[in-house]
Image (spheres, rainbow, N blue to C red):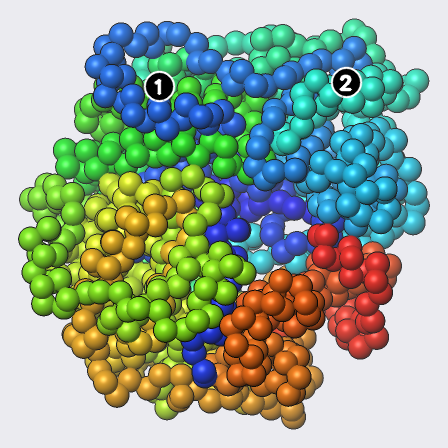
Amino acid sequence: MIRSGELLTARRRRKARANALTVLLLSLILIFVLNHTTPGKQGLKGNAKPRWTRQAPRSTRGPDKNVGWKNLGLCFSKLSLRPLQDALRGIRSLASSNAKETVTRRSKEIDDTEKINLNVSLRENSKLRRGHLSNGFTYTILPNKFPPGRFEAHLEMHVGSVEESEHEQGVAHIVEHVTFLGSHARAKLYGTGTESNAYTDFHHTVYHLNCPVRAVGRHLPTQTDMLPHALKALREIAFEAKMEDSRIDKERNAILSEISMMSTLDYRITTKEMEQLHRETILPKRFPIGKEDVVATASRSTVRDFYERFYHPSRADLFVVGAVDPDLAERQIIRTFQSVPRNRTQNFQQRLSTLSNSVNLNLKIQKPSVSLPDVLTSGLSIKKWNMTSNGLIMDSAPKSDTPPPLRGLGKQGNQWSVRPNVKHRFSREGVSTASKTINLTSKPSVFLHELITSFHLILCSKNPITSLSTVGDLKKYIILRLAVSGIVYRLNSRCKSNAPFGGVEFDHSDSASEGCSVTTVKILCEPEDWSSQVKLGLGEIQSIFEGGLSQQEFECIRDAFTIDAQQAAVQGDDMPSGDVIQGLMDADLLGHTFMADEDYSQLALRLAPLITLDEVNTYVRYLLEYLYSYGQPNAPVTAAVLACAPRRLGNSSSEEMAISRTVENLLRNEKRSRSAVTAENSQRQATFNELISPDRLSQIKQDTSPNWERPTDPEQGIARDVTGVEQRRLNNGMRVSFKRTGNLANHFTVRVVSPGGISRENQFKPGAVRAAVHMLSQGTSAGELSREDIDLFCMKKLLNVTVGLQHETLWWEVSAPVSSASSAFQLLHLMLTDTKLHEDDLGLVKRMMKSQFYSAHRSLESAPLETLFKALAFDDPRYHKPTPEMVDMITLDDIEDAIRDHLRNDELEIIVVGDFQMNETEQLILDYMGSIPAKGKFRKKESSGLKESRRVKSDLSRRNQHISISDSERRAIGYIAGSGPYRWGFSAERPSPFDDGTGVWMGGAFGNSFARKNAGAESVQAKINGTDGLIARRSHPAYVHSAISVFEKMLNTELFIMVRDTLSLTYHVQLDIGKAEHLPSNAWLLLVHSQVENIDRAMDACVDVLRRFRASDNQLEDAKRA
């Protein structure tokens, strides 16, 4: 595989939708301001993400598992409550000029809510163009504006690891590698600005290309139409692959390296969970990555045979999304794929007959035989499979070489019916019927391992996927997501306030890859006294089940949903084609209607007022019943119960059985402990709409007299012309930088950056800065407001808050809709002036930091990095994880001092990027940030500042080190690190720029330093305008970053070609310059995965590439285009 997501963990988390352009702009603004105001694949196959499912196949994924202010907007921003972005994935593409008008019409729509007919079918996006060729090939085209001048083409082959026989486990994976990397037509796209990749899961193999509409590379004439070439490459990959012996052998070695790379502890826990969850199916016996011995020994003929058996057009769906003309694209698709033969071989019938000896086939579709609650019953329709109450069943052999496409399952298109038996036993099949009662609840399973450092209990139920095709279905789905959001919020707020453990995580999500919907509760705690902590976690589940959500919680969650529905329409044109196409593919697989943003927004805003608290609490009970009623007659089946614990808790089978019995007794026990949070506390929460009242703000402004300083630096105007950044300074000393963008409509991000970060740790008593970030990320009280009040406020206003730490900076960041801008700045004001820290929170943070220390030193990925950091920093304790002894020494005063040291107004920078109104935002900044006094609770004049940051030295005596870690799997990983140019042109270690007297950048300084010293603003502007190209380029704030990025791209390409493709020594090799979070900004880090027997050769090959690399003009141009 090349790109894929985690099987359960990543699959159940919402894919991060952070816009890369916004992040880059924040970084570039920071570069610019500090430089001006402070002195001092082609998809290279091989990425470190686990394989075997699509990046995020469960489309109603749950929230980011972090709790606290790091995830305050969890219910909607993180929880996929832009319905259909993940579950429907169907709200993409039609936010037209009427979108904003849609929001203004809301009051009229709500007046008409009673007229909604819930039986009406949802309207599919009218811009979709679908087609079906005579050879069985299907295609879907959707124009999309963002990013301009590019398109995505994804070819989905309905063949995955479930097609493999016992002796073929891993062959589908090999075929994916060989077809993709063996394509000469795909290779010709390199250097055109095209990125390509592929992945395999249980049921699908997907090849995807991200291309410019017009070629800009050296292999094709400039301005060549790229769509025909992209389609030609996909045709060759899927239907005309050469399957050469040399390529098969190369990819065999790469996959063996990938298997080694993927066998992390998290992966192993995930496989154990899968084995429990799907034990009645073939899925746990067909993990897409394959079995190591089969991959190593599978014959070339076996690989070719698998390809010939399954890669034909009747199993293919093509999706094209982006800046394309549908008519031209359709003609080109027909021209490219119409001539592909329906069957590749004469003996296909014979091969199919052999396959059907062990697989029953059936073309019949049935409704579920079990009785589901009315709120959840809307039919079952999963494209590509035949669904019965038990799952996927096929029973009779086809009579022709290629079975005809089924009609009526999912959307119009290719319904390939010959699929292996995947028969799920759903949790509610044990619910009582008129004639019998069955309960097949799973007995607790135990996984013990020496690398596990904490105890966690995983509890799952699974049910059929419910398709979304009517207005009533959409209403039920919205109710479901509100219920999930409420459960997540309640568990986070209660557990982090009272529980002496890591907390309780909750998720409900659909998986097209697995063909079911899964509900998961995970209880995390320390190994010591784990049973009492698990009991407390189960008590919280019981409390939510019995009491439901409060009216205040429900109203906050529904308000947040309303804001999100408005955002969906406004931002429709801003959704990247990559997100749109993934949503479209998931919608088709899950049987959902793919809606336009405008249609969805109008409908959702009309449905929201119809939803009641009772309906949401009905879903809350439905989702949690499998745990609340565990083991009772008529209770839903708990599909998986898995306890993961350190090996020391059970060194014998009898001890494992004791753990299993204890878990079962806890689940069956009706008298469970509950947290100290009372019902009264949960009922009193957040009825307010603001954190700082107008009267309070008026008083603060009267006391501080906020104002803007007049610009004194003549180069501020130049900066605005070059970068689009506008700079101001408040009279309290804070610098402010603005950059208006249109890349995400009606949304903005504000970041408050303080220099220092890890560099500002106390060298003799380190850890306080890290502890401060942990504590702030978990959420704290502020002013008169409790943590729960602030959590609920942020959820209501869709505020997504992050506190981040790097080697040289600490920052507070809030992303929000523009309509919540005032709320965002109110929150920042409180966080920076009146945060309250508590001793109880410190205890939780210390346990977390100790757990991270132990986990890092037992992990093959992390332990070498810690050793490397020590050598690079000459054992400076600031730059590696604090030991438990260091953690014990941290006090609350130390943390307050660490925060105080980062809150000097004259060092703080406020960066605002997004689609905001300048005048309104300037006023908000003036009101809430300008009113922060230069001295206050978290202020002290003697704050150290950058001057105390020392240059970090390396210990050259430890240049070569080997580390051995005890593990049950044979794995190897290599790191190479060193010092190079500063990515941002300056650093805490070197705050003064250098130049050689000619204005040329040297070792990380900028040419504009020379310009400021030796030339006036007019002279610099002349150079910017082109009279001196070299100086103009090197005077740009993004120059160093851009130059290093291009250099990094060239090196990674060369590493891939030599170490991965030519020598077949690795699956993944990656060089990063200045990106390691806890290393200086001039540190570079190279990572290479390999098998144990090949790791030394792989490391030597990487060093050889680094030493001999000299860039050619062609390599430079290719890297710049990429």
Determine the image quadrant of residue 688.
top left
Q: Which residue is mark 1?
A: 603
Task: Judge left or right: residue 621 versus residue 691.
Answer: right
The residue positioned farthest toward the front in the image shown: 1018
Residue 1022 seen in the current view: yes
Q: At 27% across and 17% down in the image, what residue appears?
A: 109
Q: At 33% across and 86% down in the image, what residue appears?
A: 944
Determine the image quadrant of residue 1099.
bottom right
User: For mark 2, does the 10 Å Cα neighbourhood hold few (<14), some (14 to 19), or many (20 or more) residues?
Assistant: few
Q: Position of residue 219 (x, y in %)?
A: 86, 46
Task: Judge left or right: residue 564 versus residue 303.
Answer: left
Classify the position of the N terminus by image quarter. Answer: top right
First of labels 2, 1 by sequence position: 2
Q: Which residue is mark 2?
A: 331
Q: Position of residue 678 (x, y in %)?
A: 10, 47
Task: Judge left or right: residue 961 versus residue 931.
Answer: right
Q: Position of residue 938 (x, y in %)?
A: 21, 75
